[in-house]
Amino acid sequence: MKRENKIPLAHIKDGIEQYKNTAYTSKEWETLLYGWRQKKHYRKRETNKGWLKTEDATSLIQYALNDRVKITFAHFATFIV
């Protein structure tokens, strides 16, 4: 898969935390990921690579925030507008 189609989970987490002006503990982040995986019918091994495809990253951010958030990606950061 091309590098531009891989969004690191750390960047997704940082973007969500900046947008919500909060910090997740590791347990809270894992709980959020678990809920999203359940909603998408994914198994942990499918999304436990340290990165997500662009469409999955968008889905996770929308799950964590709401459907009205616009999301763009760059190689180095996640921008939530």
Image (tube, rainbow, N blue to C red):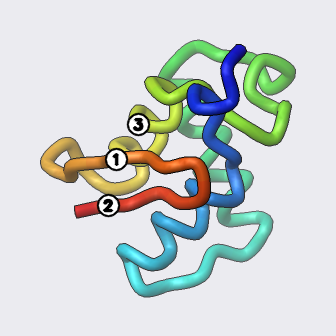
Locate the C terminus and report the quarter of the image it occupies: bottom left
Residue drawn at (39%, 43%), measured in percent from left and top?
Answer: 63
Q: Position of residue 41 (x, y in %)?
A: 58, 13
Q: Nearer the viewer, mark 3 or mark 1?
A: 1
Along the line of sight, the residue nearer the viewer: 77 or 13: 77
Give the amino acid type for the residue marked by disc 1 in the picture: Thr
- Element type at mark 3: helix
- Sequence order check, earlier mark of 3 and 1: 3
Dot 3, crowdedness within 10 Å: few (<14), some or many (≥20)? many
Residue tagged by mark 2? Answer: 80
In the rendered view, would you say 29 is above or below 6? below
Give the amino acid type for the residue marked by disc 3 in the picture: Thr
Is the residue under label 1 in contact with that under label 2 (CB below 8 Å)? no
Q: Is residue 54 left or right of residue 69?
A: right
Numbered tag placed on residue 29 in the rendering: none
Q: Position of residue 18 (x, y in %)?
A: 45, 78
Residue tagged by mark 3? Answer: 58
Numbered tag placed on residue 72 in the rendering: 1
Locate the N terminus and report the quarter of the image it occupies: top right
Give the amino acid type for the residue marked by disc 2 in the picture: Ile
- Sequence order check, earlier mark of 2 and 1: 1
In the rendered view, would you say 50 is above or below 66? above
Q: Position of residue 67 (x, y in %)?
A: 20, 42
Residue drawn at (49%, 84%), measured in percent from left and top?
Answer: 22
In the rendered view, would you say 38 is above or below 73? above
Residue drawn at (34%, 43%), measured in percent from left and top?
Answer: 62
Residue drawn at (81%, 41%), measured in percent from left and top?
Answer: 50
Q: Position of residue 8 (x, y in %)?
A: 69, 46
Along the line of sight, the residue nearer the viewer: 19 or 32: 19
Q: Nearer the viewer, mark 2 or mark 1?
A: 1
Is the residue under label 3 in contact with that under label 2 (CB below 8 Å)? no
